[in-house]
């Protein structure tokens, strides 16, 4: 089964802490409306959990997510503020499928770059909620890497493919 099947409907729930490095335009209309944020959280990749590898074992359908975003605008839109920008992210999911080269467990990963829209709900200085959506480039790979090294590790690639896809996020 191809892990890219239905990947255009990825649902990523990012339990995120977003930090703006500039002032909030709601509190100060003259402030720069550029927002840079980072998120660390959980991804849900159901299609990966449905894989039936040739080697014994299974892939985890939940894994780690890391994202860096740059958004500008800050237009009032309904109950929130709307920002337009781009996201660069990474998903990493583990498995108990033993590789054939280093005898290490295989890992599935996805890197994406997506233009996106983000709605920010809540008041400055309080807990905020984000709702965002994007569509763009996704690269998926399954590989095995040495476990006992820090830098310049041997990596054996089992699968690599790229496609157009999208996401819906809540954080």
Image (spheres, rainbow, N blue to C red):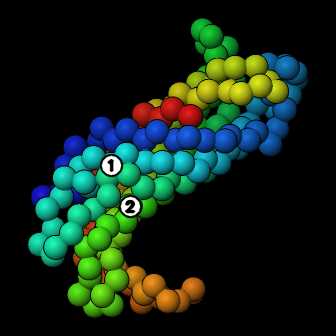
The answer to whether 126 appears left or right of 62 in the picture is right
Residue 78 occupies quadrant: top right
Q: Quadrant of the C terminus?
A: top right
The answer to whether 159 appears left or right of 123 in the picture is left
Residue shown at 69%/20% (left/top)?
122
Mark 2 residue element? strand
Residue shown at 35%/70% (left/top)?
107
Residue 105: x %, y % from top left: 33, 77
One can see residue 70 in this view: no
Is residue 60 depicted above or below 69 in this figure?
Answer: below
Residues marked 2 and 1 touching at CB (< 8 Å): yes
Residue 31: x %, y % from top left: 86, 28
- Count all numbered tags in the image, as a single digit: 2
Residue 163: x %, y % from top left: 29, 53
Name the residue tied to disc 2.
93
Question: Closer to the camera, 75 or 168?
Answer: 168
One can see residue 34 in this view: yes
Q: Quadrant of the N terminus?
A: bottom left
Mark 2 nearby-residue class (10 Å; few <14, some 14–19, many ≥20):
many
Name the residue tied to disc 1.
45
Residue shown at 43%/61% (left/top)?
92
The answer to whether 81 appears left or right of 150 in the picture is right
Is residue 159 depicted above or below 48 in this figure?
Answer: below
Residue shown at 48%/56% (left/top)?
64
Q: Which mark is residue 91?
A: none
The answer to whether 141 appears left or right of 120 in the picture is left
């Amino acid at each position: 089964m191809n892990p890219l099947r239905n990947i255009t409907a990825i649902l990523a729930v990012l339990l995120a802490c977003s930090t703006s490095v500039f002032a909030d335009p709601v509190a100060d209309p003259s402030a720069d409306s550029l927002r840079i944020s980072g998120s660390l959280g959980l991804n849900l990749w159901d299609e990966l959990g449905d894989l039936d590898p040739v080697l014994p074992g299974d892939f985890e359908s939940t894994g780690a997510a890391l994202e860096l975003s740059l958004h500008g605008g800050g237009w009032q839109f309904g109950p929130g503020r709307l920002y337009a920008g781009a996201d660069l992210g990474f998903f990493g999911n583990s498995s108990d499928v033993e590789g054939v080269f280093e005898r290490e467990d295989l890992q599935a990963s996805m890197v994406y770059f997506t233009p996106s829209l983000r709605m920010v709900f809540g008041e400055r200085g309080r807990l905020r909620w984000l709702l965002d959506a994007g569509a763009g480039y996704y690269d998926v790979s399954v590989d095995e890497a040495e476990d006992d090294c820090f830098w310049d590790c041997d990596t054996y690639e089992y699968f690599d493919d790229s496609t157009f896809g999208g996401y819906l996020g809540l954080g």
